[in-house]
Image (cartoon, rainbow, N blue to C red):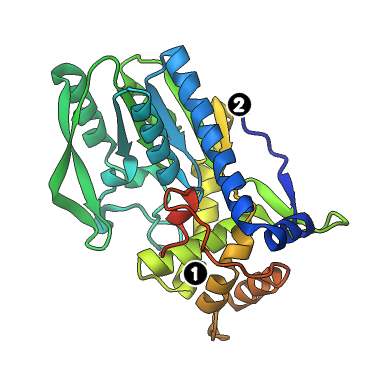
Amino acid sequence: MKRYQAKMEKISTEQMTESLIRDPRSVFAVEEAAFDSKIEEVCNAVIQQQTTMILLAGPSASGKTTTAKKLMAHLNAKGKSAERISLDNFYKPRNQLPAWKDGSINFESIDGLDLDYFHQLMRQLWEKREADFPLFDFQESKRREKTFHVAYSPDTFLIFEGIHALNPQFFAAMDGHPCMGIYVSVHSDFVAQDGRVLLPARQLRLTRRIIRDLASRGSTAANTLSMWDKVLKGERLYIHPYRPTANIHINTVHGFEPFLYREKIEAALADYPADTPDYDTAMSLLKMFRHFPACNGEFLSDRSLIREFYVK
């Protein structure tokens, strides 16, 4: 298992293209099996070390939610009790969120989370061995009346998932339990034979978010792109300082992704308004994807992490 290293991994675009032409079913199966192997390795480590508090963080569109769900499923398959607690459910209502200096809403700061309420529920969980956790409705920007129940025993694995999960402000709520920090990211560049980067990891992550936001959240590509600079600024300020503290780094890139996304990103950016500040970024992204012949999702597993972004 690896800790975070700044240097990007490299994927040969030419080799991946040839493999997908020759045997796409095998490529999808191998890539998905490799990722599941990473999850299996993490599960074995936390069980062996008896580290039941798992703090899973990472930037936007890195695959945190599905990674956390996969960890829980693997632990359950090994006969372990596991619960996933999404820190997104502790967001404050929109009218209580902090602001950037320009007056726009700051969705990225940890100050947008109700940490007092989180600590209150965690104290209840330790003392009473159970607590009802909130569910946040992002369309309504408020907590739902419905909650979800978490039961706890000393051998229960708790997976805390969110962009701020590695922030020290959460450690105090762990009641002295040893924690395993996991940093999830998109950490591979797609390169040409001569080493030129054809699709940087960050642009792959942007592509994931555009496609997911459009399919699952009803948000246009223009809306996603308009927020992207603030998202990246938030990552530099609030996430990157804590990634060296993670015990394990998981790279969620699957080698077939750009080929799978080509038609969807082209559709999402079709007729992109030329009078917007992000027009050049959109056109640059389209240009990058010309290097990747399109493939469909015929061989994509329903359990694949990529289903978080490639919705049927």
Q: Secondary structure at mark 2?
A: loop
- Asked if residue 148 is positioned above or below residue 141 in the image, the reply reads above
Viewport quadrant of the N terminus: top right
The reply to whether dot 2 and dot 1 touch (C-beta < 8 Å) is no
Query: Residue reaching furthest right?
Result: 194
* Mark closest to the chain's N terminus, 2 or 1: 2
How packed mark 2 is, by other alpha carbons closer than 10 Å (few <14, some 14-19, many 20 or more), is few
**Residue 131 position by quadrant:** top left
Tag shown at residue 1 = 2
Tag shown at residue 74 = none
Residue drawn at point x = 45 percent, y = 55 percent: 307
Answer whether residue 92 is visible to the viewer in this image: yes
Answer whether residue 227 is visible to the viewer in this image: no
The answer to whether residue 52 is left or right of residue 294 is left
Residue 145 position, x and y percent, is 11, 50
Residue drawn at point x = 55 percent, y = 71 percent: 265
Residue 25 position, x and y percent, is 59, 55
**Residue 115 position by quadrant:** top left
**What amino acid is at disc 2?**
Met
| Residue nearest the viewer, comparing 247 with 304 | 304
**What amino acid is at disc 1?**
Ser
Residue 263 position, x and y percent, is 57, 73
- Asked if residue 198 is positioned above or below residue 6 in the image, the reply reads below
Residue drawn at point x = 64 percent, y = 45 percent: 187
Q: Secondary structure at mark 1?
A: helix
Q: What residue is disc 1 on? A: 226
How packed mark 1 is, by other alpha carbons closer than 10 Å (few <14, some 14-19, many 20 or more), is some
The answer to whether residue 16 is left or right of residue 310 is right
Viewport quadrant of the C terminus: bottom left
Label 2 to label 1: alpha-carbon separation: 36 Å
| Residue nearest the viewer, comparing 255 with 235 | 255
